[in-house]
Amino acid sequence: MEKPLYIVFLAGGIASGKSSVSRQLASLGAQVIDLDELSRYVLDSNEQLKHDIAQAFGAQVVDEKTGQIDRARLAQCAFESAFATALLEDLELPAIKQELLLRLTQAQKRVLADTMKSNHGSKSLSKAARICVVEVPLLDRMEAYFDIADEVVLVDTPVELRCKRAMQRGMSEADFWARAQRQAPDQWLRAHADTILPNGAGEDDLARAVALWWKERLDVVS
């Protein structure tokens, strides 16, 4: 049986434009998994994780009214030091990766079920659904899972431009650099990418590059 999914890890530094690329690909028919959204989901739904985080960071990160993790307070605590950031990642990443594997399995099942419908003459999904894009904010934290990806795509944007965009969205310059410094360096990202989409010339140029990449990948999954 042919491989049901073509799995893409879509990466880029903070404010690089990867979410814009992800939305464009979703509009073209790709299945999309956003690890930021997945992280929020496990924080809300995984009781063991909530317990472990409260134990590690204190009761102040739990909203007294809802019993849920207060993400703003948790982020404030986690970004206080490199140690605190690493501690949160050690707690969160296993749950995030487990949920990612579950969602990829679900995506594969949707494609396989659709293939059976098609074989029986029923209306089927577009072949675009065989391309599954995983939006990855911290690619270096997913290195152990590179073997499940068919391709790593990097949205490569100059860091000064990323800072400007982040500030236009309301982030302080200090906050941008604090977050950027905890992400993998651009050189590391480029070295681990199979495809690089430059994003320094404007949205239209990026959209055209994405459209060309998409057309080529549709040929791969045909």
Image (tube, rainbow, N blue to C red):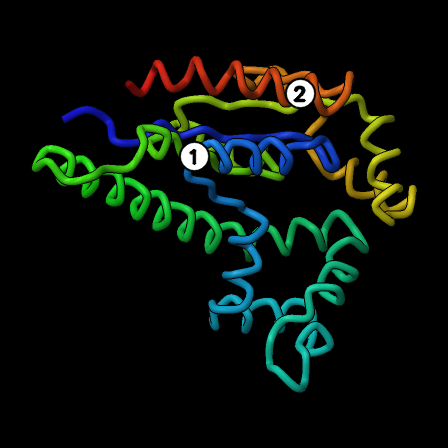
Question: What residue do we see at 50% from left, 23% from top?
Answer: 152
Q: Quadrant of residue 43?
A: bottom right
CB under 8 Å between discs 2 and 1? no
Other-residue count near label 2 (Cα within 10 Å), few / some / many at <14 / 14–19 / ≥20? some
The local secondary structure at tag 2 comes to helix
Say which amino acid is labelled 2.
Leu
Horizontally, is 160 left or right of 108 in the view? Answer: right
Q: Nearer the viewer, residue 171 or 179?
A: 171
Horizontally, is 143 left or right of 105 in the view? Answer: right
Spatial CA span between label 2 and label 1: 17 Å
Q: Earlier in the sequence, mark 2 or mark 1?
A: 1
Horizontally, is 108 left or right of 128 in the view? Answer: left
Q: Nearer the viewer, residue 4 or 84?
A: 4
Question: What residue do we see at 14% from left, 26% from top?
Answer: 1
Question: What residue do we see at 51% from left, 61% from top?
Answer: 41
Identify the mark at residue 211; answer none if there is no mark.
Answer: none
Horizontally, is 7 left or right of 118 in the view? Answer: right
Question: What residue do we see at 48% from left, 72% from top?
Answer: 47
Residue 213 drawn above or below residue 39: above
Q: Nearer the viewer, residue 172 or 182?
A: 172
Identify the mark at residue 30; answer none if there is no mark.
Answer: 1
Identify the mark at residue 206; answer none if there is no mark.
Answer: 2
